[in-house]
Amino acid sequence: LYLKELAWVRKQPRARGTKSKSRVEAFEKVEDQVMAYQQGEELKLELQVQRLGGKILELENLSKSFGDHTVIDQFSHTFSKGDRIGIIGRNGTGKSTFLNLIMGQLEADQGQIDWGVTVKTAYYHQQGIQTIEPKARLIEVVRDVAEFIPLKKGKVLTAAQLLERFLFPADTHYRPMSTLSGGEHRRLYLLTLLMTNPNFLILDEPTNDLDLQTLQVLEDFLLEYTGCLLIVSHDRYMMDKMVNHLLVFEGQGQTTYYPGSYSQYWIEQNERVQQEKQKLAAQKKSKPSAQPQLARAPKLSWKESNELEKLEGNISELQTQLAQLEADLANSTQLDADQIQRLSKKHGLLQNELEQAENRWLELEEKREAYEASLA
């Protein structure tokens, strides 16, 4: 955006006085942001994270149900130094419940949760900041957490410096909390957690409601972060960059550990579904007479059949909307910064919605085909 606006400002210098004043002011604002960001880059966030001992977090036979609905069933896992684990799964499969359990905000029905004595956690959850006085100033809120955080080589990062790195310029540091937008509230909440300098960071959907610049700052921070990291997110791009293992919440209390990236898992899942389809088709085609009759698979309910039919239309519509958005973004020279940011955010939301719709469609289609195969 800066390079595009710079090229515009440089055109026909003799006529510059007649250029749109608002366009020039917009360029100057973008230039200030770019310069501030570049200056911030000079201060590398090489945090001096508190040393972790041999034990980090051990979970043994962890179980949790709500009535007849089992969310987690006999789950065990041992976390190690340097773990960067992503948590994925459809909505309602227990991802946030799992985080609340290990953080002690919910009580498990069964099992043990054993934290190491050297672990210092920070938990970014969807509720955000709840108890801050509306008249409190931004700099006061951060300094109440810590005056500074230590960096390597004896350096420190002050509260004011971290505010600036997270896109709160110096002239905003004494604004009252009541003047912040929803996105600014979430950005400040994230900042206050990082100011505690945790060595085990837990993030529940951190990309929701954050603007593109904040996401870039967050990614830079997390890439440099040397503690343990646990992230719940539907953002495949971010997960591929930030984590190297997955906990997959599959529903019905089943949780699987996957030693790879989100994209690798997604490719393997699609391949598995295709293999199952081919296997069912081959079985249906061969129909060996000596083959014993298979137990009949459950039939789609009327509600599921209706949902499957609607999903096909919804997927087609979402694909059309995404294609149009991508075409609009490809012509970004016609758009201003706010329009690009708004379209990019909408693109991410539509992509997540499409991914969930496709997952659900595959699930229902597989069930339908299994039922038809059992009739053959």
Image (tube, rainbow, N blue to C red):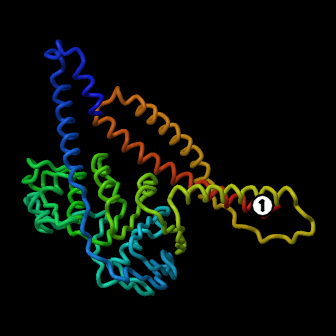
Task: Indicate the position of residue 48 as horizontal and vertical percent values.
Answer: 24, 68
* Residue at 37 percent of width and 30 percent of height: 332
Q: Is residue 25 above or below residue 310?
A: above
Task: Indicate the position of residue 272 as horizontal and vertical percent values.
Answer: 66, 60
**Relative depth, front residue between 32 and 86:** 32
Task: Indicate the position of residue 280 as horizontal and vertical percent values.
Answer: 76, 59
Check disc 1 and report its element: helix, strand or loop.
Answer: helix
Q: Where, quadrant-wise, is the C terminus in this rendering?
A: bottom right
Residue position for label 1: 373
Amino acid type, label 1? Ala
Image-quadrant location for residue 122: bottom left
Q: Is residue 38 above or below residue 125?
A: above
Label 1 crowd bin: few (<14), some (14–19), many (20+), radius 10 Å? some
**Relative depth, front residue between 297 and 220:** 220
Q: Is residue 196 left or right of residue 336?
A: left
Image-quadrant location for residue 191: bottom left
